[in-house]
Amino acid sequence: MNDKLAQNTIGAVDGYIRSALNEREERERNQLRKWIWEGIFNIPHHQILLRGDDKLSESEILKVHFALKALKNGEPIQYIVGKVPFGGLEFSVNRSVLIPRPETEELVMMVSEKVDAEGMSVLDIGTGSGCIAITLAKMKPSWKVTGCDVSEKALALAVGNAHSNGVDVQWRLQDVLQWQLSEEKWDLIVSNPPYIPIGEKEQMEDSVIGYEPHIALFTPDDDPLIFYKVIHQISQSQLRENGLVALETHHLLGPKVAALWNDPHRWEVTLKSDLQGKERFVFVQRKGNA
Ligand SMILES: C[S@@+](CC[C@H](N)C(=O)[O-])C[C@H]1O[C@@H](n2cnc3c(N)ncnc32)[C@H](O)[C@@H]1O
């Protein structure tokens, strides 16, 4: 790359980034430039022009080179820069965890608006980067939040994310499919579990299939609701009266997930759409004395 650069200034490198990304649509190209400047150099997008004559070192230019190469190979920019904004916080990400999605941010915002009680005990199942658990703990300092995941590497990242965002969350290494019911009670169970039937793999983008952890994405074709069924069982005996289950799911599975809590004397079930109008969130409230 360096020999194609007339100068080692921010302006020249930005020009190089633009031309390396010239096959992408303008909007995507500009977003990626923004990610590169902000994510790798902490330079806000609006300062690129102002700082056009500032010089970059050889090693900084190499970082741009590797980022562009990885983008060309289809790696998501979030893994390349190693961090992602979520709920007003910043999360480190690597290939051990799903990249937190905007829909999941919607779920967190819905939960925080719906529930304003103090001191809630909260369980986040399949916590990944910890984005749900940590954002809730930050927004609701009185809540006692626990995040669990079957992946040790994911939990290691979540621990660091809680630390860097200044919150206290309990973490458990737990295969939820092997959950042992107990006397422990929760006021809120929240989860964005794996929900994509493995048969849909062929239709998915290469950048997802090639880089995001399959354990975070897929369920068996013959049992796409497997995680929701377990969460249903946990809620039957470990959710407190008036407690809430808040779930994200596949936009075609919402009604089926909702139907698991099919006893109207016991549960009040609400299906909610995301900002794209897709029925993606299921809220289940346990009725008092039920
Ligand atoms: C769709 S990702 C969600 C990650 C994060 N909560 C988010 O919203 O970005 C599902 C998570 O469930 C975890 N997981 C998969 N199978 C599991 C199991 N049997 N028990 C517990 N966690 C599991 C994965 O490691 C992954 O972190």
Image (cartoon, rainbow, N blue to C red):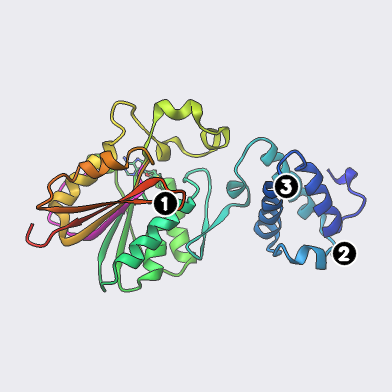
- Crowd tier of the residue under label 1, counting other residues whose Cα lies within 10 Å: few below 14, some 14–19, many 20 or above: some
Q: Which region of the structure is painted magenta?
A: 179-193
- As measured in the structure, the alpha-carbon distance from the residue carrying label 3 to the one carrying label 2 is 24 Å
Farthest-out residue, front = 277
| Secondary structure at numbered mark 3 | helix
| Mark 2 close to ligand 1, CB under 8 Å | no
* Dot 1 amino acid type: Asp
- Nearest the camera: 65 or 265? 265
Q: Position of residue 52 (x, y in %)?
A: 84, 63
- Residue 141 placement (x, y as % from top left): 35, 73
Mark 2 burial class by Cα count in 10 Å: few <14, some 14-19, many 20+: some
Identify residue for label 2: 53
> Do the residues under discs 2 and 1 have CB atoms within 8 angstroms?
no
The residue to which callout 3 is attached is 26
Which residue matches tag 1? 274
Q: Nearer the viewer, residue 155 or 264?
A: 264
Outermost residue to the left: 289
- State the separation of the CA atoms marked 2 and 1: 43 Å
Q: Disc 2 marks which amino acid?
A: Asp
Q: Where is ligand 1, by quadrant?
A: top left
Query: Image check: 69 left or right of 160?
Result: right
Q: Is residue 161 above or below residue 228?
A: below
Residue at left 27%, top 61%?
Answer: 122
Residue at horizontal 21 percent and vertical 42 percent from the top: 259
